[in-house]
Amino acid sequence: MKIPSVEKFSRDLATETVESVRSASVAKVDARSNALKIAFDDLEGARTQAAQIKDYVLDNLPNLLPQLELKCRLNGIEVHWAKNASSARKTILEICKAAAPEGGSIVKAKSMATEEIHLNKHLIKNGYEVVETDLGEYVVQIDDDTPSHIVTPIIHKNRKQVAKSFEREGLGPYTEVPSELAMQARHHLREKFREAKIGISGVNFAVAESGRIVLVENEGNNRLSTTAPDVHIAVMGLEKVLPSETDLPLFLRLLAGSATGQQMTTYIHMISGPRRKDEMDGPKEVHLVILDNGRSKVLNGPYKEILRCIRCGACLNVCPVYRQASGHAYNNVYSGPLGAVLGPALEGVEKLPDLAKASTLCGSCEEVCPVKIPIPRMLLQLREEANRKGLVKEMIPWSMFSVGSTSGFRWRLGLKMLPLAPIAKHPAKSGWEEFKDLPTKEGRDFRKWWNGRS
Amino acid sequence: MGDREAILTNLGKAGKKSRLPLPPAPMPALTYDALWEIFATKLEALGGRIGNLQDLEVILSRPHVLDVESATRLGRKSGGADVWAAEVGVTTVDLAIAETATLMLSTGPGRPRLASLTPTLHVALVPKERIVATMSEAFTQLTDRTTVLITGPSRTADIEGILVRGVHGPGDVLVIPV
Ligand code: SF4
């Protein structure tokens, strides 16, 4: 089956969905800037600092990863290395088989790394019941859907849709009250936490000097998944390591503000290993799976800086293309500007040649990125690479932005003409209207960026 | 070649680049009272509450209170409800952080990991002088134990961006300076 391109997908999207994504994105952008203003006197300085620490990490992984491994082992955490997705799946299945040979429930906390390696399907095929426990991810799972945002997975759904799904699954009587829906999920998932022998999570940060795994969340399902079962498996992209514990406050505040507009995320779980002899609860085994899956290749190439990413989702919320198209259009686990770079960088531009076109190059993503990733520059490079390899044949409708942006004059013309352009007939034109104020509002002025770019 | 060696070979040699030191984080010189005031304001904004010892008496008389050692240390009889059945979990925290209304809670003997998580009400006892101004200051006092930082009640905004408290963890957090 031919996979539809981002623009085709976007044209077919229900107005309702576009509206959910758009309004939620706008709200998140406002919350973000308020929270960060309160949290930092010098936000610019904090972002520079964070970017610099991440660059240091990316340059020193050959030292930091073995240091992390050693410190984790001293803490009683077993460390595994996986060079690709299939190796990671195999390792994780072996741990599961040793812990629960008869199958049974596995509770899962939200994790992009496990999505990336398509872990759930593999475990289910091998006889396990895998239960996503983050509220949004749970809805995605029972609907056999995929997340449309890396932080808020059901940004494309409204409460009626959630209510119908819960009623269908027998969680309780039909209700459209979000707090009642949340309580239905709480009761249903409690039983899963109690019975599961295995919990699987991602990793937000892992500290090399202390061998500590750091998990960040608001709901409490992540803590439950990593505390209640006997075995905890944490899956981590190898770029997630931080040198020192004292680096955490900076990153935790940047992440909370950028992701959800909070001063601090509700729970920061800093795991120093399995239950100790004097403790009453906690997992008996903790495993850390360090995943490469293309990252070491990216590190040595032109898209290296994308590995600074802390998965906050701010670039998605602010992106006019994401707002119009929703995360599903990207046809990749990672969507939005982040995904348009990370997807092709990890998997090869041959597999995802279209993604770099899904951008207006307005510069907003770089402007909000807490680790200052030069996403527009990398998108241009990806386009060049796709062109060079003859992978992109047509540059039509949606791509008026990508065509326009290869020349300053045509871009300016494009911006001017936008309100009159045929797009105005688009059924969901509300989303498009944002193109008009974007470059001056959140984003740096595109032409300035363009002129200073060489 | 195993995966470990394959990955380390691909990564190649470490760069020599040194890192910027973190900027100095000045500690505001505030009295305990001032710090508690900041903490209380921030906590209430998040939907948490500040209480006193009378509140604790009332709570300890309720059924299904999980308290392993916190109240006992204050000379009060403590409950021992099953962690999954408990409606209230009482803990003594290591530190309170004023700037974000965050509690720092480490695990250890008499400090179960789930006590602050499974009940619907988490009562956190904080010795009055165990409050610091900033997150950075708190991190200098981190122990080597598994530790959780708790900022307000459990929450989600997954459904239409509407804030709901208490989705998986406690929807009610009561902090009592003691
Ligand atoms: S690229 Fe930057 S803004 Fe986008 S998710 Fe990653 S850290 Fe956040």
Image (spheres, coloured by chain):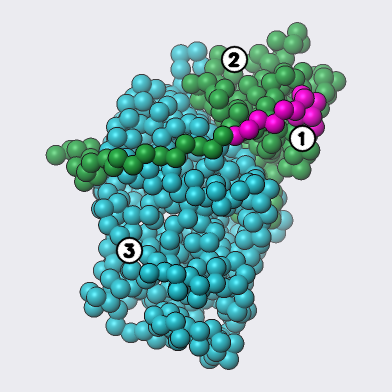
Chain colours: A cyan, B green
Q: Is residue A167 visible?
A: no
Q: In the image, which disc is placed on residue B110?
A: 2
Q: How far apart are labels 3 and 1 at the CA level?
A: 47 Å
How many neighbours does mark 3 have within 10 angstroms: few (below 14), some (14-19), or many (20 or more)? Answer: many
| Residue A371 forms part of the magenta stretch | no
Q: How far apart are labels 2 and 3 at the CA level?
A: 50 Å
- Please tell me whether mark 3 sits on a helix, a strand or a loop: helix
Of badges 3 and 1, the one in the foreground is 1
Across and down, in percent, residue A34 comes to 68, 54
State the residue position of label 3. A344
State the residue position of label 1. B38
The residue that appears at 76% across and 24% down in the rendered structure is B32
Across and down, in percent, residue B17 comes to 33, 42
| Residue B30 forms part of the magenta stretch | yes
Quadrant of residue A207 within the rendered picture:
top left
- The type of residue carrying mark 1 is Ile
Marks 3 and 1 in Cβ contact (< 8 Å) = no
The residue that appears at 74% across and 33% down in the rendered structure is B39
Q: Which residues are magenta?
A: B25-38
